[in-house]
Image (tube, rainbow, N blue to C red):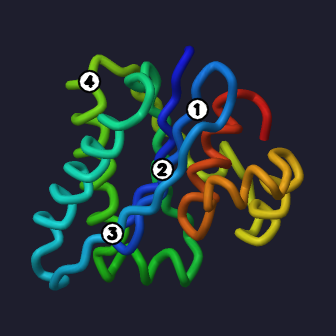
Amino acid sequence: MKTILAIDPGLQGTGLAFFSITGLKATSVITVRGRSEDWVTRCEQIVDHVDAWMKVQVAPARRVVCEMMEHHGSAKSSMIWRSGDLQRTLVLVGMLAHWARTQDSIVELVPPSEWKGQLPKRIVEQRINKRLGLPLVRQLGIKTHAYDAVGIGLWALGRF
């Protein structure tokens, strides 16, 4: 694939990383504020922001790789499942996948266990800083959720 959009979906922040054939070109973090009971509207707004952000990139994404949450039997993950946070994020993933298909992109959903295993966030960030170099990381302003999106993109390219 010549272009890849990597997405780390989340209602509190959605990370984006756009890769062309020559490497990482742009990153962004989308945050949409709203009441918790209006989460479907927030999902729609996130998708709209992704669409607008992609319109300013050099080319459409031919491949969209989006993290797909997975449920494990731990106490923490069970609480997230019961609170509804995981289900809400899965709705966002579905909406993003649908959007990507309307863009004629190939959609790939990848669970965290596949692209990063059990690595904690700080190790993911360190690995990305090392792979890309701090000058590029600073130039692109990679932060928070965009780090995971970059990691997902690098994984998709076989470079994570």
- Could you tell me which residue is drawn at 41 percent across and 69 percent down? 13
Circle 1 residue: 19
Circle 2 residue: 16
Tell me the distance, in whole angstroms, between the alpha carbons under discs 3 and 4: 22 Å
Label 3: element kind: loop
Which corner quadrant of the image does residue 39 belong to? bottom left
The mark nearer the N terminus, 1 or 3, is: 3
- Could you tell me which residue is drawn at 23 percent across and 35 percent down? 99
Residue type (three-letter) at the residue carrying disc 2: Leu
Residue type (three-letter) at the residue carrying disc 3: Leu
The x and y percentages for residue 15 are 48, 57
The mark nearer the N terminus, 1 or 4, is: 1
Circle 4 residue: 103
> Are dots 3 and 4 in contact, CB under 8 Å?
no
Q: Nearer the viewer, mark 1 or mark 4?
A: 1
| Quadrant the C terminus occupies | top right
Q: Nearer the viewer, mark 1 or mark 3?
A: 1
Circle 3 residue: 11
The x and y percentages for residue 97 are 30, 37
How many numbered discs, if any? 4
Tell me the distance, in whole angstroms, between the alpha carbons under discs 4 and 2: 16 Å
- Could you tell me which residue is drawn at 61 percent across and 52 percent down? 112
Tell me the distance, in whole angstroms, between the alpha carbons under discs 1 and 4: 16 Å
The mark nearer the N terminus, 4 or 2, is: 2
Q: Is residue 30 above or below residue 99?
A: below
